[in-house]
Image (cartoon, rainbow, N blue to C red):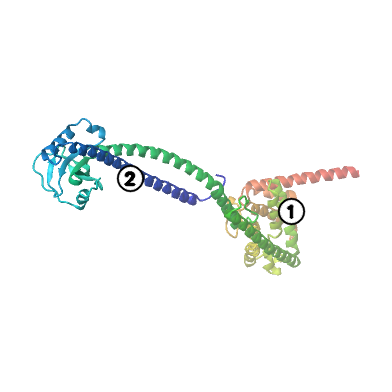
Amino acid sequence: MALEFSPILARRVMGLVVLGLVAISLLIHQQSEAVLETALLDQVKQRANIFMVGIERQILDLEDPLDPAGLQSVIDRTLESNHLPELGFAIFKMYFFDAQGNIMAHSIPGQHKQKVMLAAYTRVFQGEAYLGEGLEYALDPITKRKVPKIDIIVPLEYRGEVAAALEVEVNLEETMALIKSLDDQYEQTILVIVGSSALLILFFLWWVMQRWMFTPIAAIGKVTKDISVGDLSARVEVLQRDELGSLALSVNQMADSIERLFSEQEEAHMQMLQSLAKALEAKDAYTAGHSARVAHFSVQLGKRIGLKEKQITLLRQGALMHDLGKIGISETILNKPGALDDHEYEIIRKHPVMTASIMRPLKRFREFVEIAAWHHERWDGKGYPDGLKGESIPMLARIVSIADTWDAITGDRVYRKGLPVDKALSILEEEQHLGQWDPELIGTFITMIRDEQEIRREIEQDMSMQSD
């Protein structure tokens, strides 16, 4: 991504989507499993009911439908039938009983206890078939395993009334195995469908949210961050007509207001600095001329090393005001014709900090403060006021340091004359690698001054030849 932003919101949104899809999948699976189980069980019940209706017809064909021996023969023939597997279920138990719960015939030989006539059995003798209310489990006498079963009870009518009931305990082991097999297949199908659908939905949602949510939020965040570090020209490109578009417009309006306020404050502060500069010029004419010359040499060196126009402008303005803190130093010290004593020198050494304090309200132009505060730092870390070393000293401050030194040794003072250019250049060359300046930068400055001197000599020669 081109823009940097925290992915927390993206993870939260996509996480909620994933949880939603998982929850929906689980719900679909559970519901489908319940529906499948109910449908198959209903189908088994209906088949069992039809099967038992067929048995009822066999019983009615008997000479005495209530004869236990005849009923037992019907049970035996039914269990020996080859058509049972076609029904899709097995018979666990099958028996007849009367209204008092007495067992009239049973698929399992032997004596059987009288049935307790529950409400369901009472309704059967009122003519209502009972198709089971839920799964039960019984112990298989052969395999000794608990198997699922369901009870189906139908009334047997004889001579216009319910004379007995037929109960079949249907073994659902094969049915439940079939349900599990179908459910496994369905689960795999659902997993493939939901999984592929989820991936498509996630990809589509990510693309939509990336385009309409995350990218605009990141753009707004970047602009607010730029504004917070002083880039008041930063603005959000408004591409949407929604809540985020409104937020972007609000951020731009806020930036306009902040930039306007800062511009007004900076303009007022610049006017104050110009007033201080004029006051300093009246107090110390040398400092004003010195600052102008330092600005000139600084700009020349800045252009020589390829600084951009914006930096050149900052360099010129910063150099013009680099000694503004001297407004707070006594004229007797500033204009003293002789060497300064230790106390006076310590006072002079405070002017970078004083200048930086005056310029500190210009928050967007921190280069002014850096130039003012650190143009007396040294490359070897032995300068003042903070003992910065090497490239930790800002570039513009390093440039002004060289220009300041150059004007100090070539400019005239009350108590001494400035050195000739050639002599001054020799000193710089001798001290180029002794730790006061950036060696590469001072080398470029020396070359620049020599080039200017060469051009000046050529011009003078041309003028001399023309006069002759």
Q: Quadrant of residue 244?
A: bottom right
- Marks 2 and 1, Cα distance to the nearest angstrom? 90 Å
First in sequence: mark 2 vs mark 1: 2
Q: Residue furthest top?
A: 82
Check the image and name the residue furthest to the left. 111
* Residue 405 screen position, x and y as percent: 68, 55
The residue wearing badge 1 is 296
Residue in the foreground of this view, choosing between 344 and 226 = 226
Q: Amino acid at mark 2?
A: Ala
Q: Which residue is mark 2?
A: 34
Quarter of the image where the C terminus is located: top right
| Element assignment for label 2 | helix
Rendered view: 454 above or below 418: above
The image quarter containing residue 397 is bottom right
Mark in the foreground, 2 or 1 = 2
Q: With 450 as the anchor, is 164 left or right in this view?
A: left
Residue 265 x %, y %: 67, 64
Q: Is residue 443 left or right of residue 417?
A: left
**Rendered location of residue 16, percent (x, y):** 44, 50
Q: What's under tag 1, amino acid-wise?
A: His
Residue at 59% over, 60% down? 385
How far across and down, in percent of the image, does residue 324 sit? 69, 63
Asked whether residue 382 appears in the rendered view, the answer is no
Q: Residue at x 72, y 49 (%)?
A: 300
